[in-house]
């Protein structure tokens, strides 16, 4: 471990040719390399990262439109932190300094207390465990338990940006095994569910990304589990993220120089606190866990 910095305390994990850097602020992934080449877009521990690089997103992923939702007859307001869309973005824990309760050569666990507040008056115990394996890559498990006496609305995601060693993503072949996609309005609020072909974002068989802009939630994924993959044009290099969540947000990192693609496994779609679409309701004492893995081969 190192001293506390802008992104908190850094933990370095190693297994085989993999190395991961985890930071305590946002319980985030600050780097993942294989043989020294980047599999996720990195940031230094002493800097404030752009674009929620690698952050843990709880107790909701993506957006709550206008920062307002109604739960069991009561309207709640959470802080709007994306002024361009007027939305409450990515939950409450991305900029919290989590506690490191375990760290060794190839695994680490960070925990935090999601404190009740006026806009989200439920208490949750949260944990993120990172485990690095020489063959399987990086496994990430996000866990939360409702410790209040009332049911709590809940959603979870993580925000890694996959990269082929920071090469321009126009040359990536992107595969997303999803049949449906959410169409959004100018404020990125979901409007309707469409087939991927209707919005010209069918990546089921893999295709060159080129200059196409993607910032959408995909669904109708294989229920037994799915994998989103980036490959180079020669198919000699790849990086992939695997999960079994019903949704995945894919973003072509247009605001970060298009050297990566954000792949965010999500338990629910954007604005689920209003639509209740796939929203998790944690009963008192109930827990929820989500696991995903990142692996690759850059030759």
Image: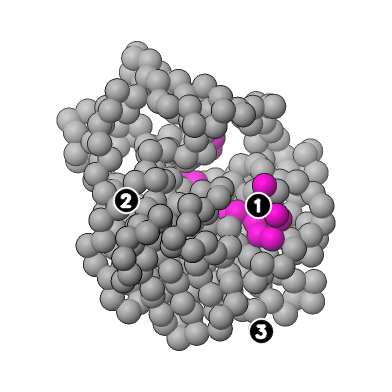
Give the answer, above or below, for where 76 lies relative to 276: above
The residue to which callout 2 is attached is 97
Q: Is residue 254 visible?
A: yes
In this rendering, position of residue 174 left or right of residue 36:
right
How crowded pointer 1 is (Cα within 10 Å; few <14, some 14-19, many 20+) is rated as few
Closest to the camera, between mark 1 and mark 3, is 1
Tag of residue 256: 1
Q: Please tell me how crowded label 2 is: few (under 14), some (14-19), or many (20+) other residues with Cα within 10 Å.
A: many
Secondary structure of residue under mark 2: loop
Alpha carbon separation for disc pair 1 and 3: 25 Å
Q: Nearer the viewer, residue 151 or 29?
A: 29
Answer yes or no: do the residues labelled 1 and 2 have beta carbons within 8 Å? no
Q: How many marks on residues? A: 3
Whether residue 130 sits left or right of residue 190 in the image: it is: left
Span colored in magenta: 255-271
The residue carrying mark 3 is: 299
């Amino acid at each position: 471990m190192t001293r506390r910095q802008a992104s908190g305390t850094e933990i370095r994990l190693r297994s085989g040719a993999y190395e991961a850097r985890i930071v305590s602020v946002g319980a985030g992934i600050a780097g993942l390399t294989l043989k020294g080449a980047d599999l996720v877009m990195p940031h230094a521990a002493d800097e404030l990262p752009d674009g929620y690089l690698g952050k843990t997103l709880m107790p909701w992923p993506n957006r709550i439109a206008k920062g307002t939702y109604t739960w069991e007859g009561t309207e709640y307001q959470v802080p709007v932190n994306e002024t361009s869309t007027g939305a409450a973005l990515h939950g409450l824990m991305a900029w919290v300094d989590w506690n490191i309760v375990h760290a060794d050569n190839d695994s680490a666990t960070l925990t935090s207390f999601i404190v009740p507040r006026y806009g989200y008056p439920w208490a949750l115990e949260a944990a993120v465990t990172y485990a690095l394996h020489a063959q399987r890559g990086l496994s990430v498990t996000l866990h939360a338990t409702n410790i209040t006496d009332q049911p709590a609305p809940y959603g979870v995601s993580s925000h890694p940006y996959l990269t082929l060693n920071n090469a321009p993503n126009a040359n990536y072949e992107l595969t997303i095994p999803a049949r449906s996609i959410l169409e959004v309005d100018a404020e990125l609020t979901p409007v309707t569910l469409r087939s991927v072909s209707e919005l010209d974002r069918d990546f089921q068989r893999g295709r060159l990304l080129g200059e196409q802009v993607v910032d959408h939630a995909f669904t109708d994924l294989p229920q037994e589990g799915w994998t989103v993959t980036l490959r180079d044009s020669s198919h000699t290099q790849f990086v992939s993220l695997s999960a079994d969540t019903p949704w995945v947000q894919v973003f072509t990192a247009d605001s970060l120089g298009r050297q990566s693609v954000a792949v965010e496994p999500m338990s629910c779609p954007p604005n689920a606190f209003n639509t209740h679409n796939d929203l998790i309701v944690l009963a008192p004492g109930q827990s929820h866990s989500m696991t995903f893995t990142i692996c690759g081969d850059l030759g």
